[in-house]
Image (cartoon, helix red, strand yellow):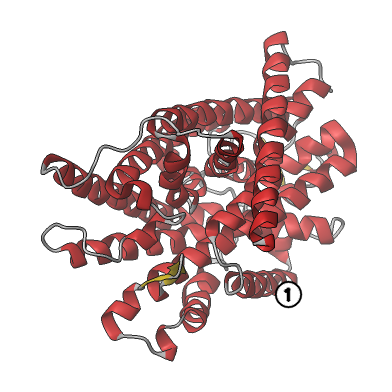
Amino acid sequence: MTIASVSPEGRRKGKGKDVLEENAPLLPSSRKEDGEFDEFNGASFPGAVFNLSTTIVGAGIMSLPATMKVLGLVPGIVMIVLFAFLAEASIELLIRFSRVGKSVSYGGVMGDSFGNVGRMLLQICVVVNNVGVMIVYMIIIGDVLSGTSSGGVHHSGVLEGWFGEHWWTGRFFVLLVTTLVVFAPLASFKRVDSLSYTSALSVALAVVFVVITAGIAIVKLLNGSIPMPKLFPVIPDLKSIWNLFTAVPILVTAFICHFNVHSIDNELEDSSQIKPIVRTSLALCSTVYIATSFFGYLLFGESTLHDVLANFDANLGIPYSAVFNDVVRVSYAVHLMLVFPMIFHALRLNLDGLLFPNARPLSTDNCRFTVISVALLFLIFLAANFIPSIWDAFQFTGATAAVCIGFIFPAAMTIRDPHGIATLRDKLLSVIMIVLAVLSNGIAIYSDASSLFNTAKA
């Protein structure tokens, strides 16, 4: 399993480092006649950067303009940079403890620090987080292609705009076809590096979205057709202060990629490249996030929806507005379709490790591989048809599982320090990460719960 702990007896030589086959089913398992394993031609630096960047830049980017509406531009951008640095620090701690403990998976290093309980807790969090994230992907794809309603106003989808309202342009049928034709084939790959080309395309499509959004916003700003957005939050009462914390889970979710770091590292020819790969990916994604947040909020202001793609259904006040609307929405819908298998890969492996901890590697059991894949796709498809808003899904996963995966678990293993390698700075940083994570997300959960309770009473 990808999450089992590491023992010396289970190791074999890989390309430049030891790899545990049970813990790294992405590596080839074909044998030569002399009994040795064929070596996998290690993954390239650009391919690894694209794969990790694709893991990071998923659906969270679509909610970032809405966080600017809550926080204001200046605090919002500062928070994006802060969470990028915290993510880099937590991944660096994760890699360092993995090297010392000779673990080749996140679950392995958690097991090294906290035993089977830690390993299982990590697996549960990855399953909850990734299921939530992929439900969000499907919700966005449904919003883009079939439309969505917000505040009693219906925002038409691309297919509705092209062909009108029919049963075959409805959310259920569109998501069913997307699941069967796109998600199922892409989810059938057993090795992360097989997705490097689709990952490169997905990053390119995200950049297309940012460039078009920035171009439209700049043109409208220059001709004076959009007002200057607020730079800082408006806080008229105590409730407004609590509301600020609801943006934190969105920012936490935006940088969660920890569950795929080991899978990417295991396929590298030179494992020393993983740290520069992480830094390059975080720098690239932070740039995309800041540009999207700034120009998305600048373009739509206080009308920015939780899923900013839904804003691209009206006249933007520029020539060829309808064409730009469709290009933006379709390009990002395709981007999410290509991101889906990267997140699904980690979900499937961790769920398999949770349910079948002593079974043979998932990559060698086609029956188990197929059953788990089909069951997960079915569950995600059903949930995407019943959960109304990506903000709701992100609030839940971001305030619970994502914050554990990204910050609490790496910080906790650093404080526990089973190998005695953590410095005083590491431990102080870990304490700060845990305190910030628990306090901010606790307040966010309280604020969301209060809001839902008040809505129900009304």
Q: Residue furthest bottom?
A: 167
Left or right, residue 164 beside residue 240: left
| Residue drawn at point x = 47 percent, y = 35 percent | 71
Q: Is residue 227 left or right of residue 320?
A: right
In which quadrant will I find the C terminus?
bottom right
- The type of residue carrying mark 1 is Cys
Decide if residue 371 is in sight here: yes
x then y, percent, for residue 270: 53, 33
Q: Secondary structure at mark 1?
A: helix
Relative to the observer, which residue lies in front, 36 or 113?
A: 113
- The residue under the point 80% across, 60% down is 360
In the image: residue 287, left or right of residue 422: left
Q: Where in the figure is residue 11, as x and y percent of width and height?
A: 77, 41
| 176 in relation to 73, above or below | below
State which quadrant residue 168 falls in. bottom left
The outermost residue toward the top is 424
Q: Is residue 36 visible?
A: no
Position in image of residue 294 (x %, y %): 33, 39
The part of the image, by quadrant, that contains residue 348 is: bottom right
**Along the line of sight, the residue nearer the viewer: 39 or 446:** 446
Residue hosting label 1: 367
425 lies left or right of 124: left
